[in-house]
Image (tube, rainbow, N blue to C red):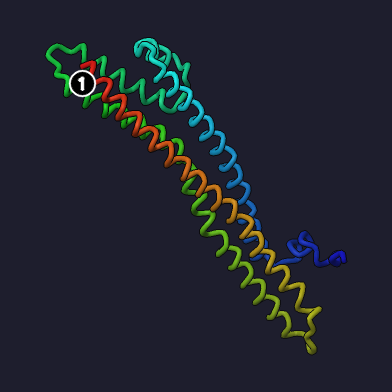
Amino acid sequence: MNAPADLSVLALVLQASLPVQLVILTLVAISIYSWTVIFKKYQVIKRVSGQSEAFEKEFWSGGDLMVLYDEATRGRHGDGLARVFEAGMREYLKLRKQPGAQSANQLEGARRAMRAASQREFDGLERGLPFLATAGSVSPYVGLFGTVWGIMHAFTGLANIQQATLASVAPGIAEALVATAIGLFAAIPAVVAYNRFTTDVDRLSIRFETFMEEFSNILQRQA
C-alpha cells in the first residue's frame, strides 16, 4: 500500500517544526560532507597504496639505488614509500659528503629524515578521518534531539484537541522520527568508512616501518 501523500518523507520534513528542520538540515550537511571525505580518502589511500607497492617492487628488483633516487626526485614513483626513500637517501648522501662524518651519524640522519617524511605522508592520509569519527558518534544524538523535540511538539499540540486520536498524533511523531532516521543515515557510512580507512592506514604504517628498517640495513652495509 502506498503511504498517504501527507506522510511522505518530503512532506513530513516540510511540515516539521523549525528546530526539527534545522536538525535535519544539519544532518544532511554532515552526510554530504562525510560522503565527500569518504570518496576523496578512498582515492588517496588507494593511490598511495598502489604507488608504494609498485615502488617497493622496483626497489627490491636489484636496481641501482642512485638511479632509483634520481627517478624518485623527478616524481616518477609518485608518493608514499618513494617520498620516504627520497628523504632518507638525500640526507644520507648529504651527510656522506661532509668531511669526517661517521657512519653512525649518517645512518641516524637518514632514519630521522625518513621518519619525518613518513609522518608527513600519514598526516595527509589521516586528514579527514577525525571528522568521520565525529560524524559517526554525534549524528545519532543530533537526530535523537530532533526526535525528542518533535515528539514534545506533537504532544503539546494535543492540548488544544478535545479528543486525541492516532490520526492526530501520527504526523507529528512521524516527522520527529525522520530526524532519527537521517541521523543514522549520516552516522553509519561514516563509522564504516572510518574503521576501514583506519585499518588501511595502519597497514600502510606497518609497511612503511618495515621498509625504513630494511633500507637502513642496506645503508648500514654501504657505510
Please rate how many residues cluster around mark 1, counting C-alpha atoms within 10 Å: few if below 14, some from 14 to 19, many from 20: many
- Res. 8 image quadrant: bottom right
The furthest residue to the front: 61
Residue 182 to residue 43: above or below: below
Mark 1, residue position:
106
Residue 133 to residue 176: above or below: above
Viewer-proximal residue among 19 and 209: 209
Quadrant of the image containing the C terminus: top left
Marks counted in the figure total 1
Query: Which residue lies at the image location 72% right of the left edge and 68% below the top edge?
Result: 175
Query: Which residue lies at the image location 45% right of the left edge and 25% below the top edge?
Result: 79
**How far across and down, in percent of the image, does residue 155 sit?**
69, 80
Viewer-proximal residue among 195 and 13: 195
Q: Is residue 124 left or right of residue 116?
A: right
Q: Is residue 173 left or right of residue 141?
A: right
The furthest residue to the right: 1
- Res. 124 image quadrant: top left
- Res. 210 image quadrant: top left
The furthest residue to the bottom: 162
Q: Is residue 163 left or right of residue 46?
A: right
Q: Is residue 51 left or right of residue 108?
A: right
**How far across and down, in percent of the image, does residue 32 sit?**
63, 47
**How far across and down, in percent of the image, does residue 216 sit?**
27, 25
